[in-house]
Image: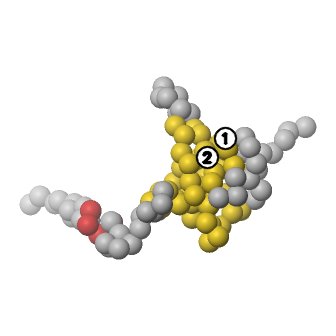
């Protein structure tokens, strides 16, 4: 008698239902900042640098104080006007003594 593992869950169950937006994440350093847009750049070893610009709307949650060269993680969703930031987390840097 052979024992088999159950089949993996269907991918359809993991995808959001139509009409719902799927969140995406992008982490890197702020290269440009304005009241309505934020540009984040990241470099992955062995790849070209990636730059992504996100729209900041009144309902965008921002944790911390964004400033140039600060490291951030942006949760975003595609929108008809462009990619919209849903949540921006500014990661603090601990200075060692």
**Which of the two discs, 2 and 1, labels the residue nearer the N terminus?**
1
Q: Quadrant of residue 80?
A: bottom left
In terms of secondary structure, where does tag 2 sit?
A: strand
- Figure check: 65 above or below 58: above
Give whichever of 76, 39 is nearer the camera.
Answer: 39
Mark 2 Cα-neighbour bin, 10 Å: few <14, some 14–19, many ≥20: some
Image quarter (top left, top right, bottom left or bottom right) of the N terminus: bottom left
Mark 1 neighbour class, 10 Å CA radius: few under 14, some 14 to 19, many 20 or more? some
User: Who's the residue at 39% across and 72% down the image?
Assistant: 20
Image coordinates for residue 65, horizontal then vertical, percent: 77, 56
How many numbered marks does the figure carry? 2
Q: Hey, which quadrant is residue 35 in on the image?
A: bottom right
* Residue under the image location 54 percent in, 40 percent down: 51
On screen, residue 62 versus residue 49, left or right, reads: right
- Residue sitting at x 90%, y 37%: 97
Q: Is residue 32 above or below residue 62?
A: above
Q: For the view shown, which residue lies furthest in the top direction?
A: 46
Q: Label 1, secondary structure: give it.
A: strand
Pointers 2 and 1 in contact (C-beta within 8 Å): yes
Q: Which residue is mark 1?
A: 31
Q: Residue at x 63, y 54 (%)?
A: 37
Q: Is residue 93 left or right of residue 23?
A: right
Q: Does 82 sit left or right of 73 as displayed?
A: left
Residue 33 location, x and y as percent?
Answer: 69, 49
| Up-down relation of residue 1 to residue 32 (above or below) | below
Q: Nearer the viewer, residue 44 or 7?
A: 44
**In this view of the protein, can residue 41 be seen by the observer?**
yes
Q: Which mark is residue 39?
A: 2
Task: Measure the alpha-carbon separation of dots 2 and 1.
Answer: 6 Å
């Amino acid at each position: 008698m052979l024992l088999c593992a159950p089949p993996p869950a269907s991918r359809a169950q993991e995808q959001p239902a139509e009409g719902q937006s799927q969140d995406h994440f992008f982490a890197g350093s702020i290269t440009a900042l304005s009241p309505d847009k934020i540009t984040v750049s990241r470099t992955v070893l062995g790849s070209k640098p990636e730059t992504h610009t996100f729209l900041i709307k009144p309902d965008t949650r921002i944790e911390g104080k964004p400033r140039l060269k600060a490291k951030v993680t942006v949760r975003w969703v595609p929108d008809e006007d462009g990619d919209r930031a849903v949540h921006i987390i500014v990661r603090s840097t601990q200075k060692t003594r």
